[in-house]
Image (cartoon, helix red, strand yellow):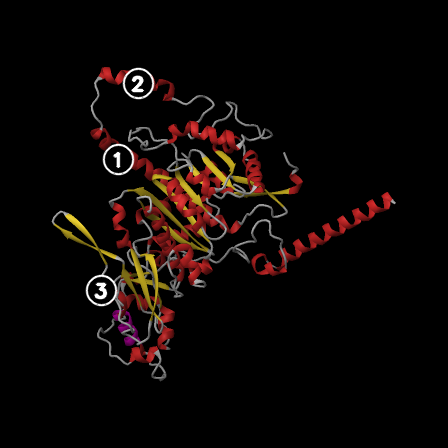
Amino acid sequence: MADLSEFKIVKEGEAEILMHKQNEVFYNKAQVNNRDMSIAVLRTFISKRKEEHEANLPKKAKRAPKVSESDASEPAKEDVPHASPPEDCRDNGECEDGNGMALDEPCNTAEEQVKSSEECNGEGESMSNADGKVQRELKPPRVLEALSASGLRALRYAREVEGIGQVVALDNDQASVDACRRNIKFNGSVACSKVESHLADARVYMLTHPKEFDVVDLDPYGSPSVFLDSAVQSVADGGMLMCTATDMAVLCGGNGEVCYSKYGSYPLRGKYCHEMALRILLASIESHANRYKRYIVPVLSVQIDFYVRVFVRIYTSASAMKNTPLKLSYVYQCTGCDSFHLQPIGRTIAKNNSVRYLPGYGPVVPQECTYCGKKFNMGGPIWSAPIHDQEWVTSMLADVKSMKSSYPAYDRISALLTTISEELPDVPLFLSLHNLCATLKCTSPSAVIFRSAVINAGYRISGTHVNPLGLKSDAPMDVIWDIMRCWVKNHPVKAQPADQAGTVILAKEPVLQANFARAVASLSKAQAKKVARFLPNPEKHWGPKVRAGRQITSKHVSLLGEAAINGVLNQEDNEESKTKKQKVEENNITT
């Protein structure tokens, strides 16, 4: 065991890790929100997976062919040796000593662990084998953390999620694998029995283990695009893919051509850019899945802090895969005003008992915006179907509230889930009330007044978890601009140049006469109860940290803070002076 004086102990949830003081392995405590949210989703996934398995048992029993007692007796005898795994082999594919692993004993080698997982893999399949034989016993889910670094996430999964099986932690950096194995032993017998660490390229490992894992977790430093193709193949049918993207400058339109090369979509720089980033990532995952006759079903998609994270289930079906064009759309964004329009890629026609898949009708917009006369920018394709499963969100929120003490970031993730639970699920992207008013150069109505006007006009409206000022509504842009025209009539603005977008919009008379009387549903349930929905960061410089192995210099002050930078630089100066003194002393001794 290494000298503990060289490390500091970091505790998160029930897991503790040893972090080297030299920034050898990447760790960012801002990701506690990410890990807590992942644990909440994983708990719900295990519960839903069990419910689905129990619901499918009667159907499978009906489909199964009847076998006579004499015929059934022989296979039963043959299966006896495999009915229960040997003492040194667990259900989740982990092989270990019967007495457990002592903290000072070395972990199994990568070759032994790979061999054991392959030997025990037959016991880990949950629903069906490759040959179609149904297994009635539901095995604990196997989890792959493809980019583990210190292993904190894998350790928290193993120690905090009830009913979880084997957790495989991968990294292609030897220092990270050493740190992960050190942390596994440091966390005791539970961690040693469930978590194993390999030195491997995640892409190769996932490709060589197709449909073996019920959950695959991708949390890279940067873009996940290079891992998506192998990840969608590694997830078992009905399994879960958790994916993070931290390259927000690319996804939000800072480098549109780079985004297109990585994700196959062109981003737009609207107020909704962070939600568009989520939808671009979902469209990219769907594209990779479709190549293998698979498709995704998003259960939760969140934008937190400096990254986006999506949780999708992956299924295999060549027929269901044909619906993908119905879930994707191009976006037309007006360059003069906040108007945007979606162009679906595909459509269907039902004829008798069959369905025909056809290209979508277009274009949905003319060459110039009908409201302000400006041109359109075109982006996408993006995922335009729902990005959340509201039933899952409700279950997760109830679970989080019932286990408040189990989540270090409880306040943040409960507020986030509360806001998501109130979003309109079938409305892609959103409007910014402040941007609408900026276009017209008018004073802004309160969110309650604007919401009331939309509701009184017969449409739905909600907030969004992405932006506190964002508003989702199924009202067309004609209605939105008519409401704003009525508002400006009651709150006049100064005259603007004739070629301004706001002047052109206000020159038209409103067709709809807006009613600004306060509607009952103008406040959401959370707002009415004054539940916190958008919380400030818990401390200064809360965001991405320096990549592991990089030297910390004064240019990182915006990421780490002045005090941290000065502390590191002073420590380096002290170390340099010590080494110089040692060299001088050695030279004096030799002379």
Amino acid at pointer 2: Ala
From what the image shows, is residue 397 above or below residue 442? Answer: above
Quote the CA–CA distance across marks 2 and 3: 64 Å
Q: CA distance from mark 1 to mark 3?
A: 39 Å
Residue 514 % position (x, y): 25, 72
Secondary structure type for disc 1: helix
Residue 279 at what x, y percent from top left? 36, 56
Q: Secondary structure at mark 3?
A: loop
In the picture, the disc for residue 55 is 1
Q: Earlier in the sequence, mark 1 or mark 3?
A: 1
Q: Secondary structure at mark 2?
A: helix
Comparing 275 with 521, the one in front is 275
Residue 400 at least partly seen: no
Q: Residue at x 24, y 45 (%)?
A: 319
User: Which label sits on residue 458?
Assistant: 3
Taking 409 as reference, is 258 above or below it?
below
What's the residue at 61%, 61% (across, down)? 555
Quadrant location, the C terminus: top right
Q: Which residue is found at the position 26% from the left and 31% from the top?
A: 57
Residue 30 magenta: no
Residue located beneath label 2 in the image:
76
In the picture as drawn, the residue positioned furthest to the left comes out as 352
Q: Are marks 1 and 3 in contact (CB under 8 Å)?
A: no
| Residue 483 is a magenta residue | yes
Residue 385: image quadrant is bottom left
Asked if residue 556 lies left or right of residue 348, the reply is right
Depth check, front residue: 247 or 493: 247
Stretch of the chain drawn in magenta: 478-487
Amino acid type assigned to the residue bearing label 3 in the image: Gly
Q: Amino acid at mark 1?
A: Ala
